[in-house]
Amino acid sequence: MPTRILLEGRPGVGKTTAIRRLAALLHTREAVGFTTAEIRAGGARVGFVLETLAGRRAVLAHVDFPGPPRVGRYGVDLEVMERLALPSLAWTARTLVVIDELGRMELAHRPFESAVRALFAADVDVVATVQAQHGPFTDALKRRADIEVLRLTPANRDTLPERLAARLEPMARKGP
């Protein structure tokens, strides 16, 4: 049975940092997927950049983008989801798929939502971040019996990546 984990937390709690740390701690298996990060200017958040674990980057959303779609005050460039996010989810049997995050901006791209549905139905380990707020797609995932929801908090955000990495690394083969 594959491991399927949703890291749930409030904005700013450290979900992106935790999932990046998890990917960096893996030594015997490949991680694929992407993370997102804020773009700040003059102390204010003005957008979000999407970065694949392979190092490709592009601005996903920005206050200066016209949209559609618009999520809050941000216009979202769905081509970034098509060019970077979707290809970054290619997996093999030993791969861990990392998605940061399953949020309104990312899920505005219907092919991405379909790809995530397929991932959670496949025989592959997945760790994804979600906000604590409600959303139809993420609420349905959280209710599934085969998905473990872990709450990320300031108290556990520094230790959780190490615990997950130890759990997700295949056991080292013993020599003869």
Image (cartoon, helix red, strand yellow):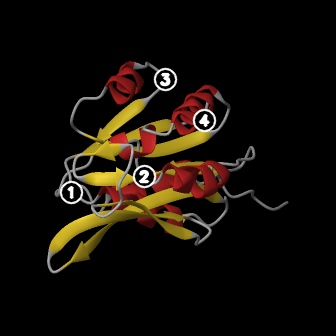
- Mark closer to the chain start, 1 or 3: 1
Identify whether 40 is placed above or below 14: below
Residue where numbered disc 3 is placed: 146
For disc 2, the neighbor class at 10 Å (few under 14, some 14 to 19, many from 20) is many
Kindly identify which numbered label has been placed on residue 13: 1
Residue where numbered disc 2 is placed: 100
Query: Viewed as shown, does residue 13 lie left or right of 138?
Result: left
Front position in the image: 108 or 126:
108
Residue drawn 62% across and 29% down? Answer: 118
* Helix, strand or loop at mark 1: loop
Front position among marks 4 and 1: 4
Identify whether 6 is placed above or below 74: above
For disc 4, the neighbor class at 10 Å (few under 14, some 14 to 19, many from 20) is few
* Structural distance between the alpha carbons of marks 1 and 3: 25 Å
Type of amino acid at the residue the image marks with label 4: Ala
Residue drawn 66% across and 59% down? Answer: 30
Front position among marks 2 and 4: 4
